[in-house]
Image (cartoon, rainbow, N blue to C red):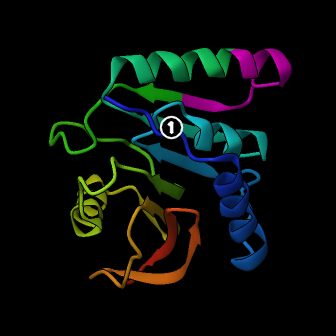
């Protein structure tokens, strides 16, 4: 399997849009990094002051890498008051649930493998959305409105599209 890390440029753009365009605070937020790979997005959220970050990836090697990266980060930063969890789970596993709701949900599934509709449906099943949660979807295709989600912004960065959705009630 291939881990395709989000480029530094895409990561920078993503957090600039959250903080400057959408005027949302990552500081003191809860952040869910799905299909997390190396965990670089969740770790970036931590470095920007998020106090709770959960990582989900079904690959053992990815979870090992995330834990290793978190250990390296904890040596540089005070991580005592942070709530961190790494789950080696399939996002679509019907037996898998999180007993928490998140401010930010970042979805970076293998390109062209899942449709945003399927992911959106699973997010509803997981019951992890707050009224004002921001759902961020990274893919190789430009996203359009999805039932149950409202497209707030979409940007192209190289060959990648990052789309920002809110939950429409």
Q: Quadrant of residue 150?
A: bottom left
- Which stretch did the figure color magenta? 72-84
Residue found at the very far front of the displayed protein:
158
Identity of the residue drawn at 45% across and 62% down: 137
147 left or right of 26 in image: left
Q: Residue at x 69, y 42 (%)?
A: 44
Residue located 21% across and 62% down the image? 118
* Residue 18, percent from left and from top: 68, 67
Q: Secondary structure at mark 1?
A: strand
Quarter location, residue 124: bottom left
Examine the structure image and report whether residue 74 is included in the region drawn in magenta: yes
Question: Whole-percent x and y of residue 108?
Answer: 42, 51
User: Looking at the rendering, in which quadrant would you find the N terminus?
Assistant: top left
Q: Is residue 111 above or below residue 38?
A: below
Looking at the picture, how far across and down is residue 83, in whole percent?
A: 61, 32
Check the image and report above or below for 20 versus 145: above
């Amino acid at each position: 399997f291939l881990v395709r890390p989000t480029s530094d440029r895409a990561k920078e753009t993503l957090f600039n849009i959250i903080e400057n365009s959408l005027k949302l605070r990552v500081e003191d937020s809860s952040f869910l990094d799905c299909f997390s790979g190396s965990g670089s997005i969740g770790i970036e959220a931590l470095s920007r002051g998020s106090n709770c970050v959960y990582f989900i990836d079904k690959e053992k090697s990815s979870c090992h890498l995330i834990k290793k990266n978190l250990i390296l980060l904890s040596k540089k930063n005070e991580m005592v008051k942070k709530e961190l969890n790494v789950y080696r789970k399939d996002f679509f596993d019907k037996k898998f649930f999180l007993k928490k709701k998140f401010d930010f949900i970042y979805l970076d599934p293998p390109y062209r493998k899942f449709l945003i509709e399927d992911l959106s449906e699973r997010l509803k099943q997981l019951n992890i959305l707050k009224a004002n949660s921001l759902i961020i979807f990274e893919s190789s295709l430009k996203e359009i409105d999805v039932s149950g989600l409202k497209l707030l912004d979409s940007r192209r960065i190289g060959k990648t599209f990052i789309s920002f959705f809110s939950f429409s009630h």
